[in-house]
Image (cartoon, helix red, strand yellow):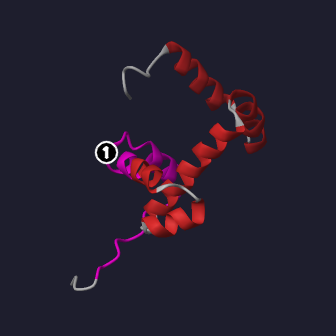
Amino acid sequence: MNPKTHTEALDHLFEAVLKLESVEECYKFFSDVCTIKELMAMSQRYEVALMLNQKMTYLDIAEKTGASTATISRVNRSLTYGEDGYRLAFERLGITEAPKKERSGDK
């Protein structure tokens, strides 16, 4: 994790999140902590990550999620060079990576 964001306050927030026991409790907590716009942005980035994990194209992802190509690119950069947080969540949820699609001319 980036040392600039690794703070005691953030530790407290994450510890609180880890104590939540259901999706309904998460709705209540995150509705108090975040604005609707923040929640929608986070959920959109997660959906983009899921679709990138399934090897969908940027165009298809943009059409299905309304995310900009800049957002899709940032999420893709996180999947490729980040801390593997998305992949850890996918693994824990039993979500596997789609096989790479062969391009025309590939053998």
Q: In this view, does 33 lie to the left or right of 103?
A: right
Work out whether 23 lies above or below 60: above
How many circles with numbers are drawn on the protein? 1
Q: Which residue is drawn at 47% across and 50% down?
A: 71
x then y, percent, for residue 62: 52, 62
Residue positioned most to the top: 8
| Res 39 → quadrant | top right
x then y, percent, for residue 89: 51, 47
Reply yes or no: does residue 28 show up in magenta.
no
Q: Residues within 10 Å of mark 1 (few under 14, many from 20)?
A: few
x then y, percent, for residue 81: 31, 45
Q: Can residue 65 be seen in this view?
A: yes
Q: Can residue 96 be seen in this view?
A: no
Q: Residue flagged by tag 1: what amino acid is it?
A: Tyr
| Res 17 → quadrant | top right
Work out whether 36 lies above or below 72: above
Q: Is mark 1 on a helix, strand or loop?
A: helix
Q: Circle 1 is placed at which residue position?
A: 81
Q: Is residue 103 left or right of residue 97?
A: left
Quarter of the image where the N terminus is located: top left
x then y, percent, for residue 69: 44, 56
Quarter of the image where the C terminus is located: bottom left
Q: Which residue is drawn at 44% across and 61% down?
A: 53
Q: Which residue is drawn at 74% across and 41% down?
A: 22
Q: Which residue is drawn at 75% across and 28% down?
A: 32
| Res 97 → quadrant | bottom left
Reply yes or no: does residue 81 show up in magenta.
yes
Q: Is residue 107 left or right of residue 18?
A: left
The magenta region covers 76-103
In the foreground, 79 or 41: 41
